[in-house]
Image (cartoon, rainbow, N blue to C red):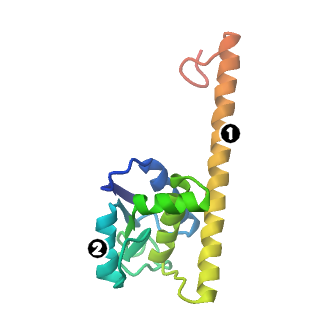
Amino acid sequence: MSIEIANESGVEVPEPSIVSVARFALDKMSVSQLAELSIVLVELDVMSDLHERWMDLPGPTDVMAFPMDEYDSSRRPDSAGAGPALLGDIVLCPAFAKDQARKAGHSLLDELHLLTVHGVLHLLGYDHAEPEEEREMFGLQNQILADFRAAKAAAEREQAQRSADSAVLGAVGLEEQDGPGTH
């Protein structure tokens, strides 16, 4: 799966973490490994222009999604003529998201994770124009984010345990030099 990210916003953000949550969401939604996604972080004025041009709404917004190819979840990667599915672009505005994060009582990174998953779901055809659609999309969004946080916490615990194990082994002179099975 190819996920490209470009930060043109002037706001420093941990780009690998945004890519990670996008990849996690795409995996959770069983999107083909051949899929391609682009994420662009932009300044307020750029987002305002996009928002007005494409949504006919004034002012900036937090996230916009621009689907490219019609995503066909039934298409097999090994079928004849199957090529990469170009999902589209997710455009995030960290400056706008920063205020939302503050109001929601969480970090900018948490807000950007939420907006990234939101954008992925839009690219996959989900919407929230009607109450039923909103319940479905936001429920799915919340579940993906909860699963992502749980997976991230588990990975951090595992890394901490490996570090602790290594420290103990090192303290007793048993640290591994070149990996398992070497003496």
Q: Is residue 29 above or below residue 153?
A: below
Helix, strand or loop at label 1? It is helix
**Residue corresponding to mark 1:** 157
All told, the count of numbered labels is 2
At label 2, which amino acid type do we have?
Asp
Of 142 and 109, nearer the camera is: 109
- Which residue sits at x=59%, y=85%? 133
Q: Is residue 56 above or below residue 85?
A: below
Q: Is 183 on the left or on the right of 38, as rendered?
A: right
- The label shown at residue 49 is 2
The image position of residue 125, as x and y in percent, is 48, 81
Helix, strand or loop at label 2? It is helix
Q: Is 100 on the left or on the right of 154, as rendered?
A: left
Q: Is residue 23 visible?
A: no
Of 138 and 28, nearer the camera is: 138
Mark 1 closeness class: few <14, some 14–19, many ≥20 residues within 10 Å = few
Q: Quadrant of the C terminus?
A: top right
- Which residue sits at x=57%, y=24%? 179
Q: Is residue 137 visible?
A: yes
Distance from label 1 to label 2 (Cα)? Answer: 43 Å
Q: Which numbered disc flags the more N-terminal residue, 1 or 2?
A: 2
Q: Quadrant of the N terminus?
A: bottom left
Q: Is residue 96 above or below residue 123?
A: above
At label 1, which amino acid type do we have?
Arg
